[in-house]
Amino acid sequence: MRKKVGKACISFALFILLIALVTSIDLAVIGPANKAIGLSHLNGAVHNLVGVYMIWYKITNYLGYLAILCGLIFAVIGLKQLIERKSLGQVDKPILALGGLFVLLGIIYVLFEKVVVNCRPVLMEGETVPEASFPSSHTVLAMVIFGAIAMLVKDYVKDKKTAALLQNLCLVLMIVSVIGRLISGVHWFTDILGGVLLSYALLQLFSGVLEKLRAK
């Protein structure tokens, strides 16, 4: 578990460093927010390179809904166990750990809705001002939920081939979500990078917790 906690700490430290960079280095007013964006040459170059593809915005939104649905399935499993076993302490510990991860995910989402680091490079339909965009919430959502479920699948799917197939599917959906969000053009490159670093930190912590629980 120590190694995974160490990896999580390194990734989180890099995430904090990225925040420092995008709020202080190479600041320039780019995008529709009339707000100075850090690492502006890098962000501007990547945005100009990939363009804006709203079809990928919609696809990644649907993948986000799928991730939430998958998370709800495990929430239902946990609720069923709670009702049948009549004690929260009797619910499978990995399910409780997943619930704790989801709570942490929700806190982080609310935090970065309030603490605006960057705004979107595009004005979304129906909006008069660009929304907060750092870190990419969809990147974090997809990576954390699909990644965590990939770790739990083997505990609840006994057939090894089916479990391996579901794990690989979760990884593919995670990768498509991250790349799709980047090429949609609704985020700066550093928004996506921040989402990846934060998600990796959370997943390493979750993996470490699972490792400890399974050892018991």
Image: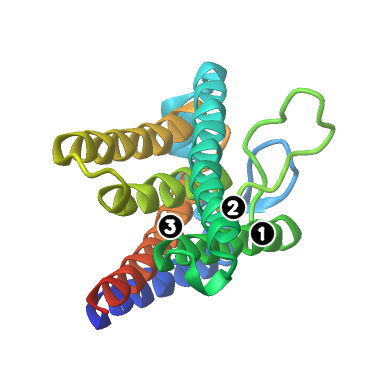
- Find residue 121 and name its label: none
- Is 107 situated above or below 120? below
**Which of the marked residues, 1 or 2, is nearer the chain's N terminus?**
1
Calculate the distance from the C-alpha at mark 1 to the C-alpha at mark 2.
Answer: 7 Å
Q: Which residue is mark 1?
A: 112
Q: Residue furthest bottom?
A: 2
Calculate the distance from the C-alpha at mark 3 to the C-alpha at mark 1.
Answer: 14 Å
Task: Report the mark closest to the observer, 2 or 3.
Answer: 3
Element carrying mark 3 = helix
Task: Report the mark closest to the observer, 3 or 1.
Answer: 3
Judge left or right: residue 115 versus residue 27.
right
Whether residue 18 is visible to the viewer of this picture, yes or no, is no
Element carrying mark 2 = loop
Q: Which residue is mark 3?
A: 199
Q: Amino acid at mark 1?
A: Phe
- Find residue 134 and name its label: 2
**Which of the marked residues, 3 or 1, is nearer the chain's N terminus?**
1
Residue 68, horizontal then vertical, whole percent: 55, 40
How crowded is the residue under tag 1: few (<14 C-alpha within 10 Å), some, or many (20+)? some
Task: Report the mark closest to the observer, 1 or 2.
Answer: 1
Residue 178, horizontal then vertical, whole percent: 41, 39
Nearer to us in this view, 129 or 89: 89
Quadrant location, the N terminus: bottom left
Q: Residue furthest left?
A: 161
Q: Amino acid at mark 3?
A: Ser
